[in-house]
Amino acid sequence: MHLLPFAWLVLGCVFCFCQAAPTNDDDFVSYSEFQVWKITTRSNEENKLVLQMIRHYGFEAWKDSDAISAPIGVLIPPPFLEEMKLKLAATNISYEVEISDLQTAINDENASVNVSAITTKMAHKMDWTSYHRLDDIYGYLKYLADTYPKLVRLIDIGTSYEDRPLYVVRISNSSSPDTQPAVWIDAGIHAREWISPAVATYILHQLVEEPTNVGLLLNVDWYIMPIMNPDGYEYTHMKNRLWRKTRSKTSSKKCRGVDANRNFGYQWGGAGSSRDPCAIKFRGANAFSEPETLATSNFITEKSKQIKLYLTLHSFGQVFLLPWGHSVTYPSDYDEMKSLAKNATSKFKRYKYRVGNLAAVLYRASGNSADWAKSIGIDYSYTVELPAKDFLLPASRILPVSQDFFPALEVFAAKVATLKVTYSFPA
Ligand SMILES: *[C@@H]1O[C@H](CO)[C@@H](O)[C@H](O)[C@H]1NC(C)=O
Ligand SMILES: *[C@@H]1O[C@H](CO)[C@@H](O)[C@H](O)[C@H]1NC(C)=O
Ligand SMILES: *[C@@H]1O[C@H](CO)[C@@H](O)[C@H](O)[C@H]1NC(C)=O
Ligand SMILES: *[C@@H]1O[C@H](CO)[C@@H](O)[C@H](O)[C@H]1NC(C)=O
Ligand SMILES: *[C@@H]1O[C@H](CO)[C@@H](O)[C@H](O)[C@H]1NC(C)=O
Ligand SMILES: [Zn+2]
C-alpha cells in the first residue's frame, strides 16, 4: 500500500520488528521462522484484545477491511510464537498460520525461470515471470528509448539519496510532445511492494512494444516512473525483503529511511504519519526531505498543466483509493473521480477491486503522493493497491495481475484524451 507497506493497517506500530534496524544496518535480515498469522475475531471485544496484543508487542499487522470479522494478518517473530499461541488459546480466539516460515516463502517468491531460454537472444533482460533487480529494469528502459526513439524518451529527473538515477519514461506519438494531455503512473514508492514496478514495466512494454495498443497513444502522452525509490528497492533485494522506506540517514543513529508516501508536501505531518525516525511511517524531517520525492514532485509540477491523471501503484489490497487520505474528507468532484474509477475497475475480470476514499477505506495517511497531486490541480488522482495475499506475491502471478490491470488504462486514456491542456507558452 502505499500506505502501509504492503498492506493496510499498521496498527500504531510503536516498534516494528521488520523495520527496526538490525544491530548493523548492513546485515542481511533473515525472516527464518517468522510466521504470518491470520487472526479472526468474532466480536468487538476480541478485536480490541487482539489489536492490544499487536500494539503491545509492536508486531506489524494489516487488515483488508474494516469489518470486525475480517481476519487480521500479523507478522510474528520467532521468540513470540509460543506466547501468542498461549494468549490466543486462553482467550479462545482462532487463528490460522498462513506462512509458517517467511524466509522460505521469500526464497520461493522468484520462481526459477529458464533465463537463458528467454533472454539470451534479447537485447534486454526483462520479463514478467520473475522479479528483477534495478539494473535489469533500468536496462529495459534504455532499451526502449534506444529501440523506439520516435516514441520513447528516457528522462533523468535526478538522483536518489544513494546516487542512483531517477528515471521517468515519456511515451508520445505526437509530433509536438508536451502539448497533449498526459497520464502519469508511478510505482515502487514503497520498496517491498515488488508487484508495483513489475506492473509498471509491463504497462511500458504494452504501450511501446505491442502494436495493438496504438489507440492508447492517440492524443495522450504517458509519463511512467517505474521505480520512485530505487535505493529501497535494491535494499529489499540485498538485505531486507520487507524494507518499505527510502534509505536516507535520519536524526536517529540506528534508524534509516523515510516513508516516501508520507513525505509529500500537502497536509504533511498530519494524522497517519509519524515523527519517529524508527517508525515505518516516518514522514521525514520536513516535506520533500527526500531527493526522490523532491525530484518527482518538481517534475510533475512542471508538467502539471499537461498531466490530467495521476496513478500511483502499491500493494496490496485490491482497491482503488481516492483523496483525501489526510482525513476522511471528500473533494468536491469526488463523485466524478469515483465514476471514472468505477468505469476503469469494471474492466477487471480476474481480480475485483473496491473503490473508495483512502482515509475511509484504509486509514489516514497525511503526506501521501495522491493527495499532493490532487492538491496541485491534477483532478483525477488515484492510489491503487494491487492484488496480493500478503507481503509476498509469487512471481508466477506477475503476468495475471498485470494483464488484468492493463485494460483499465483504456478507460483512463479515453477520458484524458478529451481534456484540454492549459499550456501557457513562455511569453
Ligand atoms: C471457544 O470457541 C468455540 C468456537 O470457536 C466454541 O465452540 C467454544 O465453546 C468456545 N469456548 C469457550 C471456553 O469460550
Ligand atoms: C533452458 O533452456 C535451454 C534452451 O531452450 C535448454 O537447453 C535448457 O535445458 C533449459 N534449462 C532448464 C534448466 O530447463
Ligand atoms: C529473480 O530472477 C531473475 C531472473 O529471472 C533475476 O534476475 C533476479 O535477480 C531474481 N530476483 C531475486 C530476488 O531472486
Ligand atoms: C504515430 O502517429 C503516426 C501519424 O502521426 C501514425 O502513422 C502511427 O501509426 C502512430 N504510431 C503509433 C504507435 O501510434
Ligand atoms: C463512466 O461510464 C458511464 C457509462 O458509459 C458514463 O456515462 C460516465 O460518464 C463515465 N464516467 C466518467 C467519469 O467518465
Ligand atoms: Zn505502498
Image (cartoon, rainbow, N blue to C red):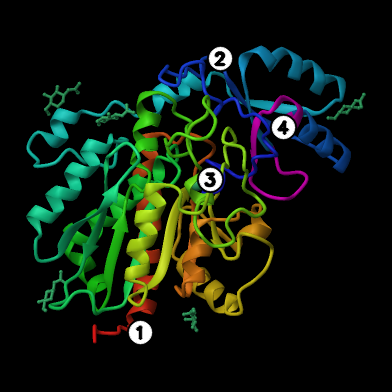
- Dot 3 corresponds to which residue? 285
Q: How far, Cα to Cα, is label 4 from label 1?
A: 47 Å
- Dot 1 corresponds to which residue? 418
Q: What residue type is disc 4 on? A: Ile
Q: What residue type is disc 2 on? A: Glu
Q: Camera-side residue: 284 or 221?
A: 284
Q: Camera-side residue: 194 or 38?
A: 194
What span is in magenta? 54-71
Q: How far, Cα to Cα, is label 1 from label 2?
A: 53 Å
Mark 4–mark 1 CB contact (< 8 Å)? no
Q: What residue type is disc 1 on? A: Thr
Q: Earlier in the sequence, mark 3 or mark 4?
A: 4
Query: At x 83% / y 38%, what residue is drawn?
Result: 48
Q: Camera-side residue: 373 or 145?
A: 373
- The answer to whether residue 400 of the structure is visible from this angle is no
Tell me where residue 264 appears, x and y as whole percent: 49, 56
Q: Earlier in the sequence, mark 4 or mark 1?
A: 4
Which is more foreground, mark 4 or mark 1? Answer: 1
Q: How far, Cα to Cα, is label 1 from label 3?
A: 40 Å
On whether ligand 1 comes within 8 Å of the CB at mark 4, the answer is no
- Dot 4 corresponds to which residue? 39
Q: Secondary structure at mark 1?
A: loop
Q: Earlier in the sequence, mark 2 or mark 3?
A: 2
Tell me where residue 108 appears, x and y as whole percent: 40, 24
